[in-house]
Amino acid sequence: MTGCAVLILSGGSGVRFSTRIPKQYFRLGNKTIIRHAIDAFLEHPGIDAIRVVRRPQDKHLYEESVAGISILDPTDGGKTRQDSVRLGLESLKDIKPKWVLIHDAARPFPNESLITRALNGLTKSHAVVPGLPLLDTIKELEDDRKTIKKTVNRKKLWRAQTHQAFHYKTILNAHRKTSQEEMTDDAAVAEKAGIPVTIVDGHNENIKITTQKDIQQAKKMLNFPDSLTRVGNGFDAHRFGPGNHVVLCGIKINHEQGLEGHSDADVPMHALTDAILGAISAGDIGSHFPPSDKKWQDAPSHQFLRHATKLVQDLKGKILNVDITIICESPKISPHREAMRKKISEIIEIPVSSVSVKATTTEQLGFTGRREGIVAQAITSISIPASKI
């Protein structure tokens, strides 16, 4: 005989949650909602077995959620929640648990103290339900559901949560007897069967995920930040060719050679564009402006940088700072550095103080040392609302 088993009900489709997958398989951080719940029970020393009651069509979502852990094989649910609970209870007959906890997969935070209170309650009662007293004033409405009929005394009213805990044989027999009647939770099944139900203190953080607003609340409970900082880096190189000037960071600089390229060959601006695209996982400059497209022949590179900046703005993000390093023997960068910083700041709409432009050489090593071309690398940090990632 097993001491205590947990049934986690994962049969809902989550219509109110408005996503293409059932809400229990939505990722909350690095784990799905149901996995958060499973892990909480796995970590409790009083739990001996866990089984998920799922929909057959969610097989792959379920398998992804439980990868790497060992629990009982899942069982398929029924047409209603009550059917699913009964089928789940019947499936536990082989392990014959003394106690069973029945939990909704959409409640990701059944903490250790809450589980312990339920288990302790079962030493004195055959049915235990966690709950919270109602704090708001409660009104009963007329049949039109618009007019208040009366104020209800809230002193004896509590909000029931899950997991709901039972002696296994007691709740199994109760479900068998009430299989044709619709009940909203398992405590109601026990009540209908004449089983006294004891209430224990629930937990405010034991929320049920029903809407997208609940996801935001859950993220705050997990200490998710309101915004995240993303970092990107970019690199570009162009060889010298015919010409009498180069364009670097949007600034035209006289030079004995030009730079070869499909556009204006602005090396540092290309590197920065790639850095921004990389920070938001939006590909690279070539995927947005393919060199095979004649449209971009000799195009000014500020168009590319403005495009990348707009993608950040579309995410309600903000470029925090950029750091550009230009690697070449010539031309000299220092006389033009401040103009470059100002130009970049105008394009990406951040203060000049947040734009760094540096220059270095390779001590006459490599193709830049042989004055065959120019290399640039760029790093940027971007703040993006956590809800957009």
Image: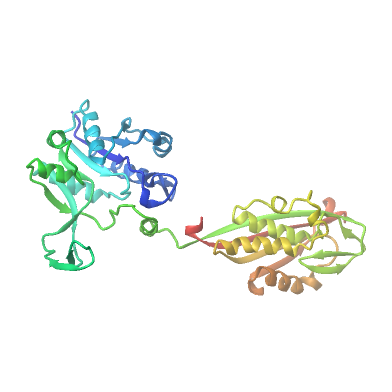
- Residue visible at 13% across and 51% down? 199
| Residue at image point 69% right, 53% down | 288
Q: Is residue 327 above or below residue 68?
A: below
In the drawing, does residue 139 fall left or right of residue 31? left
- Looking at the picture, how far across and down is residue 232, in whole percent? 62, 56
Instruction: Please identify the quarter of the rendering in which residue 317 is found.
Output: bottom right
Colour setting? rainbow
Task: Look at the image and tell me whether residue 357 can be seen.
Answer: yes
Location of residue 250 with respect to 274 vertically, above or below: below
Return the x and y of residue 278 as percentages of the image width and height.
Answer: 63, 54
> In the rendering, at what x and y percent does residue 240 appear?
88, 56
Q: Nearer the viewer, residue 8 or 49?
A: 8
Give the number of marks: 0
Task: Return the residue nearer the eye: 381 or 7.
Answer: 7
Percent x, y for residue 52? 31, 36
Is residue 24 found left or right of 132 in the rendered image? right
x 13%, y 37%: residue = 174
Quadrant in which residue 221 is drawn: bottom left
Q: Is residue 19 left or right of residue 364?
A: left
| Residue occupying image coordinates x 34% and y 52% | 209
